[in-house]
């Protein structure tokens, strides 16, 4: 199954649970507090195996992207990433209740690693990687360093 088909299936399943007052999201450059947003996207696209990268607004109304995605698939990716980030934050809060100072809250990002593709999200930056052509470890290491100073208090 191709990455775009997987993304479409995931979006269709999540769309029932994620609603937004304006379903036609606005495409505008988004900046990550204190960083130039598109520069990290450009840097990510230069990494081996990265097929697309972008940013999304935590409030869900804007996104920007570059790479091998259509505008519609980039919109779906930004919605999927925002919804999953919100879920990871909720789970981190629940774990913090059971085990205070566990080091799992606030989460810095998340990864879904499949047999062919990987989606990496750190702060509000997403990256889609072809596993056969790139290294997940190198990509996550780069994102961790590049986004180390981004505050997680926006969620």
Image (cartoon, rainbow, N blue to C red):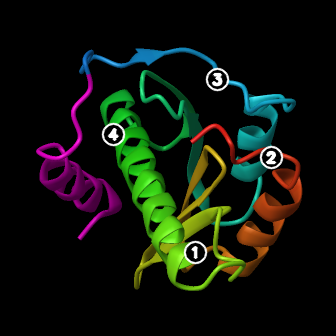
Is 68 placed left or right of 138 in the picture?
left
Which numbered disc, 2 or 4, marks the residue that appears first in the sequence?
2
Which numbered disc, 1 or 4, marks the residue that appears first in the sequence?
4
Mark 2 lies on residue:
43
Q: Secondary structure at mark 4?
A: helix
- Dot label at residue 30: 3
Is 80 placed left or right of 105 in the picture?
left
Which numbered disc, 1 or 3, marks the residue that appears first in the sequence?
3
Q: Is residue 28 magenta?
A: no
Which of discs 1 and 3 lies nearer the camera? The answer is 1
Q: Indicate the position of residue 4 as horizontal and vertical percent values.
A: 30, 53
- For the residues labelled 4 and 3, the Cα–Cα distance comes to 17 Å
Q: Are marks 2 and 3 in contact (CB under 8 Å)?
A: no
- For the residues labelled 1 and 4, the Cα–Cα distance comes to 34 Å
Residue 37 versus residue 99: which sits nearer the camera?
A: 99
**Residue at 61 percent of width and 74 percent of height:** 133
Q: How dense is the environment of label 1, judged by Cα within 10 Å: few (below 14), some, or many (20 and up)?
A: some
Quarter holding the N terminus is bottom left
């Amino acid at each position: 199954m191709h990455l775009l088909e997987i993304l479409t299936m995931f979006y269709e399943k999540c769309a029932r649970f994620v609603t937004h007052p304006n379903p036609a999201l606005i495409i505008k450059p988004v900046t990550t507090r204190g960083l130039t947003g598109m520069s990290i996207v450009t840097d990510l696209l230069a990494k081996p195996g990265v097929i697309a990268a972008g940013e999304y607004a935590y409030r869900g109304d804007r996104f920007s992207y570059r790479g091998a995605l259509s505008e519609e698939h980039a919109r779906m990716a930004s919605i999927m990433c925002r919804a999953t980030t919100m879920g990871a934050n909720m789970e981190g809060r629940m774990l913090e209740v059971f085990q205070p100072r566990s080091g799992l809250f606030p989460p810095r990002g998340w990864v879904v690693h499949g047999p062919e593709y990987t989606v990496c999200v750190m702060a509000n930056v997403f990256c889609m990687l072809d596993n056969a052509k790139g290294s997940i470890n190198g990509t996550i290491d780069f994102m961790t360093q590049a986004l180390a100073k981004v505050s997680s208090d926006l969620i």
